[in-house]
Amino acid sequence: MNERLLQYIWQFQYFQSQHLLTTSGDPLLILHPGTLNTHQGPDFSAAKIRIGQTIWAGHIELHIRSSDWHRHNHSSDTHYNNVILHVVWTDDGATPTHIPVLVLANRVSTLLLERYTHMMQTISTVACHHHLPVLNELTWFAWKERLMIERLERKSQQIFQMLQQNQQHWDEVFWWQLASGFGSKLNAAFFERVARSIPYAVVKRHRHHLDEIEALLFGQAKLLHAELKDPYAKTLLRNHRHLKKKYALEAVDGGPVFLRMRPASFPTIRLAQLAMLVHQREHLFDQIRQMNTAEEVMRLFQVKASHYWNMHFNFDDPVSQEPRFVGEQMNLHLMINVVVPILFAYGHEKGNTPYKEKVVHWLYQLAPEQNKITRYWKSAGIPNRSALDTQSLLELHTQYCVNKRCLDCSVGNRLLRG
């Protein structure tokens, strides 16, 4: 037994609640178990119970042992002054005498406890792996929607933290997020550091000159050095040295990752595509906010790297000629991981519900991403038909399954109830 499981049992009243008695022998009736409190103070607030003929309203505190009350120093904490019931798994006689105590150890189904133990001890990351899909399609649909909103709200908090760092400059945060998106999973953090090292005001000032934007990006990404031989690379190096000195640009920690990547996804290609996007699309965040369909936004991202990169994946290393367009999968990735979260956050911060509704609608329309996690869920019989499915299943895996949060999960709840 642990306190989170005990909270779960109490919250949903998964115990034999007939003929309850306190440890003092007084009859007890639960009129309302209260609301789970995730902040400081007792576990449940606004509860209502009847002991004997008296109705009490207040807080309820839960512990594994009654002696935990003193172990957690509740007697000296004013937050616990209005506790009307101390619910414990076992009673070792150490609760303040004026607080009634209810013991649950002999009232909970052993089957529920066995199922929970099995789920916690399973080696598989997904504890319910052998029981899927469990829920009917309608319940899965509702659970996925909730997961998707949780994911967007969590990402919104990250964006709000960025806004606090730059005096609420939405265009600059979008610039950071856009660069991170072009970095994909392996280079996302590094690309964001590169973008942060180039103030958005500098980007705006030089966006009309492609070679200067490329110089800023490649130079800050540590991809330009004196040994390069191509005239194009030498020009970029010269431009970067000038701009770095002019704006006192600081060096960026780390470097880009090339290992185990397809050449078309090399950081050189992605930076060249990002430079072209900035060069060709003025006021990009403004344009995106004004668009009504995902297709319109995705057309904005349909750019290709400059001519040099038609024949190169790296500096000084020519290959056969082929245009380096932002591909369909990359475009989808940018929509799902850059555009949707920042527009949702923007709508939330501005109190503009239509922005939030619009991007949720886009997720229903966009194709699903394919990765190891979504392929696993598909093999388990869970559909992945849209980007909304993708995002919700990723949230389920990373925020629930990995952390064994089965008690907070609709699937885990269904299994425990039997």
Image: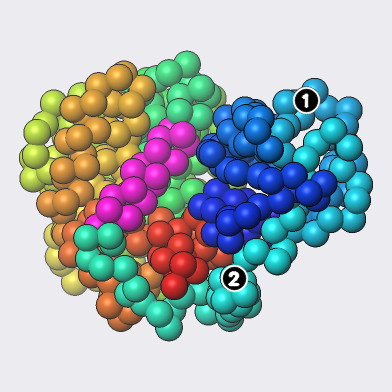
**Residue 399 in picture, x, y percent from top left:** 49, 56
Tag 2, which secondary structure?
A: loop
Q: Give the color scheme: rainbow, by chain, secondary structure or one colour.
A: rainbow
Q: Position of residue 133 (x, y in %)?
A: 32, 74
Q: Which dot marks residue 81?
A: 1
The residue located at (91%, 51%) in the rendering is 93
Q: Residue at x 9, y 33 (%)?
A: 292
Residue 176 image-quadrant placement: top left
Q: Of helix, strand and loop, which one carries label 1?
A: loop
Left/right placement of residue 271 relative to residue 396 reads: left
In the displayed structure, would residue 411 be above or below residue 124? above
User: In the image, which is nearer the foreground, mark 2 or mark 1?
Assistant: 2
How many callouts does the rendering have? 2
Q: Is residue 267 left or right of residue 85?
A: left
Instruction: Point out the stretch of residues depicted in magenta.
Output: 141-159
- Residue furthest out toward the top: 167
